[in-house]
Image (tube, rainbow, N blue to C red):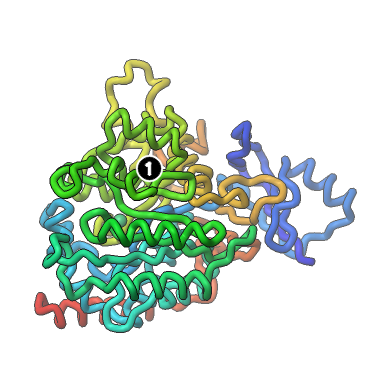
Amino acid sequence: MSYLLVEHADVLVTMNQGRSEIIDGALLVENNIIINIDTSDEMQKYLHQHNINPDEIINSKGTVVLPGLINCHHHLYQTLTRTLGTAGGLSLFDWLKTLYPIWGQMDAESVYTSAKLGLIELILSGATTVADHLYLFPNGSRLDDEIAAAQELGVRFHPTRGSMSLGESKGGLPPDNICDTEEHILQDSQRVIETFHDAEDFSMCRIGLAPCSPFSVTADLMKQSAEMARSYKVVNLHTHLAETIDENRFCLEKFGKRPLEYMESLNWLGDDVWFAHMVHPDDDELKKLAHSCTGVCHCPSSNMILASGIAPIRQMVDAHIRVGLGVDGSASNDGNQMLGEARQAMLLQRVGWPGFESSAGRFSAREALELATLGGAEVLNRKDIGSLEVGKAADFVAFRIDDLHHAGGQSDKVASLLSCAPTGVWLSVINGSIIVQNGELLNVDIENLIIKHNQLAHKMLVKAGVA
Ligand SMILES: [Zn+2]
């Protein structure tokens, strides 16, 4: 039995049902589970009564402690191609067509290295759980390669086995040579579920199935993926949907249906499904999402950088739709900064819906932090993470608010995390293990990883003939 005590947090944000915030908060962990949460004074009494001497005590004075942030949508491999498509201001379809041939040069080593680098950046920005969407597997690369990186770092991981089967010759968007046969996609999906999927509470690895988008897979693959996922326990379904006006037009032209209607026809609505984006739903689609308990992952930076539009997250939250937050691929965000993404969500909703006359309707910092914590847990169908409560997984982070960036923002320390410039974590604990302490990621040689990552990225550009 091992005990970790974190005490004297200026504010401890629980995200429990009453959204309690504890001043001078403390949290006690036994192995990987939270066993008490209270003020630091009350915690001392508890330790005394139960005769517990913590193995490690962390004084978190000068910080705000939060549930670990949850990233619900990402393409870690895209860290290899940051800036390439975004510098020129391309929109989604042109951005994809520029990058597809370069991504076709990836291999197992580049998938592993980019996943490790991207995950480190995420962890240092507050993420403790990450869902990734890997949907092309050129040159022998596999989902296994990114899972290895996540396991080494100790981050809670939801890799989704993505796929593309509808190449240009069949009316899809991607080039044929990076698409796969549906037979192999389904075989490999089954293999990764049976090899890596852990459906139990406190699981560190849950597989999802994620055909890439309506414009890169067939209807048949969507249906078969759903059937396969539902034959296992908590294998969830994920895809991109209604990201741009172009996509809405593509679906209407090709299927005679709007994107959500198309997904409904494939039996792809439900509490085991979450869609990235949903930037352009109409009122009926919002009702359908709420009624079917289908989840949405909001990716504000990506939507801004690709000029996709502003997702109506204010309306979705008000309609009790399950909404989480994602940084999206590192090539359509160019960053893996999870706290920064929560700030973007708050800012974009304020810009998007200025019509709310009273400030009461405006998206608050706390609502944005809720998307990044509890919202993400709901979207990933996890009851064991997302809030700091007795019996939940010990996944939490602390951000310093006594530093340069927050000076003068002490009147609301929680809101200052997003209203002031986002910073890196001071402490990160995942599943009871200290991963970041004093702002340093323990036991990882980041400098050499960056060098290796940049060499691999350059090699891909040379092979693709663009460098
Ligand atoms: Zn994406």
Dot 1, how many residues are within 10 Å of its Cα: few (below 14), some (14-19), or many (20+)?
A: many
Q: Please tell me in which quadrant of the rendered image residue 180 appears.
A: bottom left
* Rendered position, 440 above or below 456: above
Residue at 58% across, 66% down: 198
Q: Look at the image and tell me in which quarter the N terminus lies.
A: bottom right
Res 261 seen here? yes
Q: In this rendered view, identify the residue nearer to me: 321 or 420.
A: 321
Q: Residue at x 15, y 69 (%)?
A: 175
Residue 349 place in picture, x, y as percent = 32, 33
From the viewer's perspective, is residue 142 above or below residue 388?
below
User: Where does ligand 1 appear, by image quarter?
Assistant: bottom left
* Residue type (three-letter) at the residue carrying disc 1: Arg
Q: Residue at x 27, y 71 (%)?
A: 80
Q: Residue 21 at what x, y percent from top left?
A: 61, 36
| Quarter holding residue 288 | top left
> Is residue 118 toward the left or the right of residue 382 in the image?
left
* Residue located beneath label 1 in the image: 343
Q: Mark 1 falls on what kind of element?
A: helix
Mark 1 Cβ inside 8 Å of ligand 1: no
Q: Position of residue 231 (x, y in %)?
A: 51, 61
374 shown above or below 191 = above
| Residue at the image position 72 percent from the left and 63 percent from the top | 31
Q: Nearer the viewer, residue 135 or 348?
A: 135
- Which quadrant holds the C terminus? bottom left
Percent coordinates x, y for residue 372 in the rendering: 46, 46
Let me know if residue 11 appears in the view.
Answer: no
